[in-house]
Image (cartoon, rainbow, N blue to C red):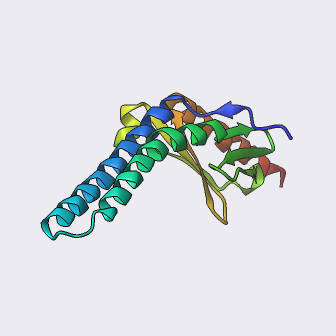
Amino acid sequence: MREPSQRISRRALTLWRIYGYINTGIVAIIAVAIIVLTTLYSWPLWPSFVIGILFILEIIFSIWLIPTVKWDRLRYEVSDQEIEYQYGLFIVKRTLVPMVRVQHVDTEQGPLLRKYRLATISISTAATVHKIPALDEREAEELRDTISSLARVAEDDV
């Protein structure tokens, strides 16, 4: 089975690693609080060791493994008839959105996406919203315009 050909921006890896650092920082604060409580109240030491192991796993998964696998799996392709989207970490899902089902297309940018000149495109159908994250700004705008015009043509054919 042929995979969709288009990849998202490589800058998405940096962005997702920043999210991983933020998550790891929160886990570090919780870990330090548990270690301080363990010391103050003379609790057994095993919770501190468990927290330490979880902290190391959080670093490995959030900062390195998950962003890399997520970027490698996430692909999309737009044709005249449909939008094909592949995503997932361990279970890879592929979705086909027929152009006749597209109701509207949006682009979104948060502060971090804007800093890295990335945008997320949202494709709305009657049932749900499909999002292709972390595209280059210009690519997201072109894709939004392309999908919008193809959806208009597909709607005229119905």
In what quadrant of the picture does the C terminus appear? bottom right
User: Splitting the image into 4 quarters, where does residue 4 fall?
Assistant: top right
Q: Is residue 94 left or right of residue 132?
A: right
User: Splitting the image into 4 quarters, where does residue 6 fall?
Assistant: top right
Q: Count the labels in the image.
A: 0
Identity of the residue drawn at 34% across and 56% down: 49
x then y, percent, for residue 132: 59, 45
126 to 74, vertically: above or below: below
x then y, percent, for residue 3: 78, 38
Q: Depth check: give the residue in front, 141 or 18.
A: 18
User: Splitting the image into 4 quarters, where does residue 31 fall?
Assistant: bottom left
x then y, percent, for residue 9: 55, 30
131 to 35, vertically: above or below: above
x then y, percent, for residue 45: 28, 63
Q: Is residue 20 left or right of residue 73?
A: left
Q: Residue furthest left?
A: 40
Q: Depth check: give the residue in front, 105 or 13.
A: 13
